Image: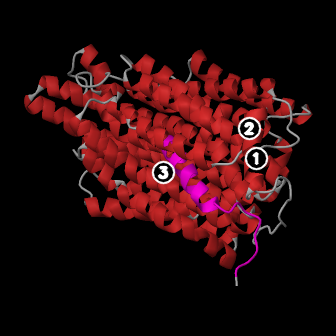
């Protein structure tokens, strides 16, 4: 006998449309990972330095994270379907600008513009899910939503590798356009409009402070790692200023009657532990993925396509386990499932500290698979824990917080662990560069890509010796970055064991805005055109 529900009759079809819309956001970052080496190449790419590559990733992420609060509020106020459509169109236009960028600066700016579109897409997909699904089915739906991330991780590197082997580097951004077109058609035809009947005012001060604080903080971290001069005023001054602005943001939000982020939510242990687990897991994973892209393509000599194929086990594990995590949570509780998932992440990231230039490829494939299984059992239960603390009409807020923490964690992972990678690499290779001219020495010390470029110009035994020294230095640097990532994930384990409740929250359905059925569906769609 079927259990009665108050979900939308086409909720699973709507979920499929939302997954397509979500794919473009996640696909973009995974495609970029395998394109980093090509973009760094001065002959076939843009000749971007390692810090410029980090900013190509983080310009998108920081804008995305900073505007998620606003996008969630706009969706709740003006209609989530409407904001989703606007976000998809903006993302397509910015993707075109990224594809035809003429230098690293243009790419960084275009990627920032993509972040605006992504900020409009990601939170409303999750808040629409919260509105069209009965709370009793929401955990399973969020598991499918999280599994879509794994699907994008699988598609991105492989498609990116295929494109890079046949076309120029900008083609990895053009792939977004047909996906967006498919998503737009589905959204227009199938997704009902929904909104918060009592929306709050926009917190422009809070949004501005969050964007400025995060940007200045990460700028200081990246600059310090790139130059190695952590005592420079622009480095420690940026870090201190960023922390000060973020502290001001918290103080302002505590006093605001319409905060972009109600920081009082973090007093709920379920909310705070879940967001900490999400942020720390992405900080750890994204930092190591940034390093592994260079390790696989330079130290191991794999092509972009081969690198993408090696990431498939990670994606396949997420795609398989994420939709099933809801059952595990029902049986064992979110604390146990999330703690085990984070423990797997801790172990696999720590294992990268044992990887050498000759580690068998199949070992790396197993490590990626186990890491993906761990991620698949962290994201769905933590996302559901956050969403269950809020009523359905405030779904945009919960979605914005979850995705902001995820993106900020990823950005800081690339910034912090990427800086550790640069600093240790620079220190380790310094002794092998004494015989090089000053310009060549600076280029080889800047990054492993620079060292390979210098070695190619030198050629012969000296070039081979420089390549070997760069490989050794980079592997040593990757060990340190992996150690830092493992510690971050371990902190997440401790936070979950200490604060995440043992049992799932079982709230009764909140009768805020009934799901559309029959004539009601037309009424909800009409709402979007009347505001």
Q: Residues within 10 Å of mark 3 (few under 14, many from 20)?
A: many
Q: Are marks 2 and 1 in contact (CB under 8 Å)?
A: yes
Nearest the camera: 168 or 256? 168
**What predominant SS class does the magenta segment belong to?**
helix
Q: Position of residue 106 (x, y in %)?
A: 44, 17
Query: Vertical placement of 83 versus 240: above or below?
Result: below
Q: Which quarter of the image is occupied by the C terminus?
A: top right
> Can residue 363 be found in the magenta stretch?
no
Residue at the left extreme? 460
Please tell me the numbered disc located at residue 524: 1
Mark 2 secondary-structure assignment: helix
Please tell me the numbered disc located at residue 528: 2
Q: Are marks 3 and 2 in contact (CB under 8 Å)?
A: no
Q: In the image, 425: left or right of 304? A: right
Mark nearer the viewer, 3 or 1: 1
Q: Position of residue 324 (x, y in %)?
A: 56, 71
Q: Earlier in the sequence, mark 3 or mark 1?
A: 3
Query: Vertical placement of 52 versus 297: above or below?
Result: above
The magenta span reads 2-25
Mark nearer the viewer, 3 or 2: 2
Q: Quadrant of residue 439?
A: top left
């Amino acid at each position: 006998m079927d259990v009665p529900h108050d979900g939308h009759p086409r909720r699973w079809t709507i979920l499929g449309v939302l997954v397509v819309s979500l794919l473009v956001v996640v696909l973009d970052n995974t495609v970029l990972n395998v394109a980093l080496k090509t973009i760094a190449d001065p002959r076939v790419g843009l000749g971007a330095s390692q810090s410029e590559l980090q900013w190509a990733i983080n310009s998108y992420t920081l804008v995305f994270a900073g505007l998620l609060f606003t996008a969630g509020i706009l969706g709740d106020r003006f209609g989530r379907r409407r904001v989703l459509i606007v976000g998809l169109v903006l993302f397509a236009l910015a993707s075109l600008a990224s594809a035809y960028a003429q230098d690293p600066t243009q790419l960084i700016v275009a990627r920032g513009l993509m972040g605006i579109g992504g900020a409009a897409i990601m939170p409303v997909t999750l808040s629409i899910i919260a509105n069209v699904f009965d709370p009793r089915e929401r955990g399973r739906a969020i598991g499918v939503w999280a599994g879509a991330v794994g699907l994008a991780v699988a598609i991105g590197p492989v498609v990116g590798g295929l494109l890079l082997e046949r076309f120029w580097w900008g083609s990895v951004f053009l792939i977004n356009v047909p996906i967006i077109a498919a998503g737009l058609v589905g959204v227009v035809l199938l997704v009902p409009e929904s909104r918060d009947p009592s929306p709050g005012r926009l917190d422009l001060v809070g949004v501005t402070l969050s964007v400025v604080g995060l940007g200045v903080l990460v700028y200081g971290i990246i600059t310090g790692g790139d130059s190695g001069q952590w005592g420079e005023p622009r480095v420690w001054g940026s870090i201190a200023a960023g922390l000060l602005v973020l502290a001001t943001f918290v103080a302002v939000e505590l006093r605001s009657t319409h905060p972009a982020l109600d920081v009082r939510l973090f007093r709920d242990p379920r909310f705070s532990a879940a967001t900490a687990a999400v942020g720390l897991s992405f900080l750890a994973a994204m930092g190591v993925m940034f390093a592994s892209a260079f390790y696989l393509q330079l130290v191991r000599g794999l092509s972009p396509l081969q690198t993408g194929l090696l990431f498939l086990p990670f994606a396949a594990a997420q795609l398989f386990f994420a939709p099933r995590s809801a059952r595990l949570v029902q049986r064992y509780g979110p604390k146990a499932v999330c703690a085990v998932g984070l423990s797997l992440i801790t172990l696999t990231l720590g294992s990268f500290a044992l990887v050498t230039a000759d580690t068998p490829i199949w070992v790396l494939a197993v490590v990626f698979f186990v890491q993906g299984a761990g991620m698949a059992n962290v994201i769905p239960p933590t996302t559901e824990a956050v969403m269950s603390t809020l009523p359905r009409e405030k779904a945009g807020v919960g979605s914005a917080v979850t995705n902001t923490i995820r993106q900020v964690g990823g950005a800081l992972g690339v910034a912090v662990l990427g800086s550790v990678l640069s600093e240790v690499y620079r220190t380790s290779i310094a002794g092998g560069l004494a015989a090089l001219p000053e310009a060549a020495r600076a280029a080889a010390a800047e990054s492993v890509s620079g060292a390979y470029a210098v070695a190619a110009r030198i050629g012969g035994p000296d070039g081979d010796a420089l390549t070997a020294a760069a490989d050794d230095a980079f592997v040593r640097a990757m060990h340190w970055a992996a150690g830092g990532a493992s510690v971050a994930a371990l902190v997440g384990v401790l936070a979950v064991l200490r604060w995440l409740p043992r049992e799932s929250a079982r709230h009764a359905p909140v009768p805020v805005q009934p799901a559309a059925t029959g004539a009601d569906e037309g009424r909800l769609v009409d709402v979007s055109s009347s505001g």
